[in-house]
Amino acid sequence: MESLKILQRIAKAAKLKGACSAVYNQFISAIESGNEKKAWQIVIANKFWMEDHLPHIKLDKIPVNTDGKLKFYKYTHLVWEASLKDGIKHKETSYYFNAHKNKQNTWVYKNGKLHGKSYGYYIGNRLESVATYKNGYLNGKRTVYNSDGSLYSILNYKDGLHHGECKMYHDGFIYHYSIHKNGHEIYRNEIHYHEE
């Protein structure tokens, strides 16, 4: 009974936070049907619902086993899916374009933190970005592509901060080059091309 009261309070907070309607509706449906496992899975996957309104509710003592795969649909279309283990996100979480089966973003989690390669895609399954996370922070190279497949930027990170070279491209040419150290720019060069 106490679990149900907490879920109802979280539902109010989610509404105040402006939760995605597809996810919120499935959350309410899970509460109303008594499916506590699914309701708590949704809470784990959307912890930000509670940040401002219910910071005192801790998710370390959830009263049900939440392990498993969680999928959200809008109408009949898969919107996103996440894997949960021991009350946290684990392995792959993916978002999908509405009415398409193509992924929009894919992240990998380890112990509840982003860890490993993440990918972003344009409609049509064309690569938009590739980045690497370590213990929740961007680490290493993040490459972004234009919708036509040409290179847009290459940025380097260390513990979530810009660290190393930053290159931005236009029509295959570098127009911005900078070097960063621990989030601070230490060198910058803007290159201007003139068409004749």
Image (spheres, rainbow, N blue to C red):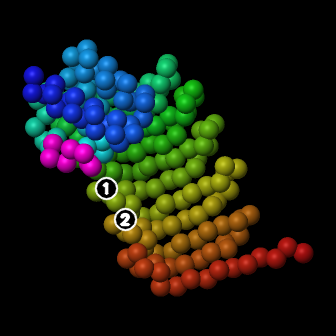
Determine the image quadrant of residue 40. top left
Instruction: Kindly identify which residue carries mark 2.
Output: 160
- Taking depth in this image into account, of 151 and 37 the one nearest to the observer is 37
The CA distance from mark 2 to mark 1 is 8 Å
The residue that mark 1 highlights is: 136
Q: Which quadrant of the structure image shows residue 184?
A: bottom left
Residue type beneath disc 2: Gly
Q: As rendered, which of 99 and 2 lies closer to the eye?
A: 2
Residue found farthest to the top: 33
The quarter of the picture where residue 18 lies is top left
Judged from this view, the residue extending furthest toward the bottom is 186
Q: In the shown orientation, is residue 102 left or right of residue 20?
A: right
Position above or below: 98 against 144: above
Q: Dots 2 and 1: beta carbons under 8 Å?
A: yes
| Whole-percent x, y for residue 160 in the image | 37, 65
| Residue segment shown in magenta | 51-57
Q: Name the residue located 18 percent from the left edge and 37 percent from the top edge.
A: 86
Q: Is residue 54 magenta?
A: yes
Q: Residue 143, relative to residue 33: is it above or below? A: below
Q: Is residue 99 left or right of residue 161?
A: right
Position in image of residue 17 (x %, y %): 35, 42
